[in-house]
Each structure stands twice: as structure tokens, then as C-alpha cells.
Image (cartoon, rainbow, N blue to C red):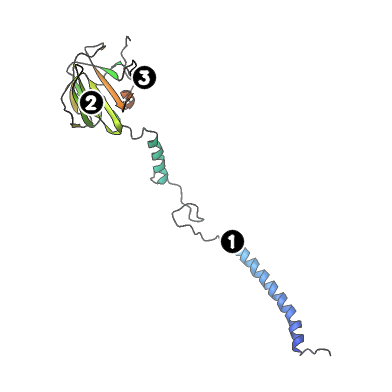
Amino acid sequence: MPRTPTDPGHLSVAAGVPVTARTSRVTAVVATVVAVLAALVPPTSTVPPGTSGGTGTARHAEPSGASGPGVAGAAGSRAADGRADEVTLAWPLEPRPEVARPFDPPDSEYGPGHRGVDLVAEPGQPVSVAAAGRVVYAGDLAGRGVVSIEHRDGLRTTYEPVSAQVAEGDRVRAGARIGTVARGHDGCPDSACLHWGLRRGEQYLDPLAFVAAAGPLRLKPWPG
């Protein structure tokens, strides 16, 4: 028996087809709109402010000379090369002396060489400490007067021959007077010389390498 238009079963079939088609079209339109909006509006960043890598919250480059992690890192790399925080030495004699004999490190611990520099001086000329530190020795050593000062970074300077005016344990500021030049330095081509030495542990160093540059050094001819 044919179904009439008022048959519930007929209505469910006839009306159901167009409703499904309309729903599909609406769904497609909504999806298109969402896609367009997603392309036009950037997503919100979930990266906390102040950290790099977040969209819309990336940090600007530090201006030249500003402080910050990048600048601190550069300073750390400079310190790692061992020179940024190195002790700077001042000349122990004034005015700036001539160098009678330069530094000549030995090839071995007991090998020949010159473990310091000889500075041209006058007998009785004041001797100043090259950097702040603590007196670790002041007195006679093998017949000559010696003063030894311990500085930071494990450095130690020595001055000889001198008539000491400090005592072991004294703390001295940079430039303080520690004694006067005495006669009797072997091999000195002048009336007197101050032998100025520098060590870090058991390693002998050239003290002139730690003096702030102030023009070319004046070297006297050395006969050796």
C-alpha cells in the first residue's frame, strides 16, 4: 500500500535527506571560517614573559654597553683567559728606571738564567712595593738584604739587595716604601741595581709583563 505524505515513515526519509545536506554545508562553512581566523590571528604565547623563544614575547637585543646576562657572559669569558683580573704591578723605583738586565727564564728548575729583572738604581734610593700585599720575608739571605711580598692570585714579588724597612707579617699598600737600595748586586753595570723578581708558586715570571704599558722600555746594553 503506497504511503501518504502524512505517513510518519515517509516524512522521516524525505525530510531527513535535505537536513543532512544542509548540516554538511554549514559544517564546511564553519570550518572555513575557523581556518581563516586562525591564519589572521596569531596564537597566544604560553612562554613566560622575559624568556626567549615565545611568540610575541621575544626579548629585544641589549643596547651596547648595557648590563645583562650577555654582557656578564662576555666578562666571564675575558676573565677565563687569566688576564682580566690579573694583578697590575707598578715600578718599584721612581723615576721609571732603565732595565740593566732583562728576564731570562731558565730551561729547567736549576738551570742557568735570570729569574727577574735588574733595574738601574742609586745606593740608598727608596724602593716601593709594586702592589698591595703582605710581607712574607724581610732580612738577610746569603749575605744580601731581601724583601718578599705576597700578593693576591698567588703572586709574590722580591726585591734585593735592599735595606729593609718592613717586617715579616706587615701588610703594605701599593706604592708603600719597603726599604732602600743597597750596593753589592752581582753583575750590575752601574753603582747599584735593584733585582726585581716575580713568582707564582714555583714558576718564575717576567715582572715587566705585569706593568701597565707606558711607552717603550729603556734597556741598557748587557755584556752577557
What's under tag 1, amino acid-wise?
A: Leu
* Residue that label 1 marks: 40
Q: Is residue 150 left or right of residue 41?
A: left
Label disc, if present, on residue 87 of the rendered structure: none
Identify which residue is drawn at 74% across, 78% down: 18
Residue at the image point whose x is 76% and y is 86% from the top: 9
Q: Quadrant of the N terminus?
A: bottom right
Residue linked to disc 2: 148
Q: Nearer the viewer, residue 44 or 16?
A: 16
Q: Quadrant of residue 197?
A: top left
79 above or below 117?
below
Say which quarter of the image contains residue 6: bottom right
Lateral position of residue 24 relative to residue 139, left or right = right
Give the image quarter of residue 182. Answer: top left
Count of labels in the image: 3
- Looking at this view, is 97 or 194 the one in front? 194
- x and y percentages locating residue 80 in the rendered image: 39, 36
Mark 1 neighbour density, 10 Å: few (under 14) some (14–19) many (20 or more): few
Query: What x and y, as percent, mark residue 196?
Result: 26, 21
* Callout 3 amino acid: Ser
Spot occupied by residue 125 in the image (x, y as percentages of width and height) = 18, 19
Identify which residue, 205 or 201, lies in the foreground. 201
Q: CA distance from mark 2 to mark 1?
A: 76 Å
Q: On the rendered image, what quadrant is the C terminus found in?
A: top left
Residue bearing mark 3: 108
Q: Residue furthest top?
A: 223
Q: Residue at x 70, y 72 (%)?
A: 25
Amino acid on which disc 2 is placed: Ser
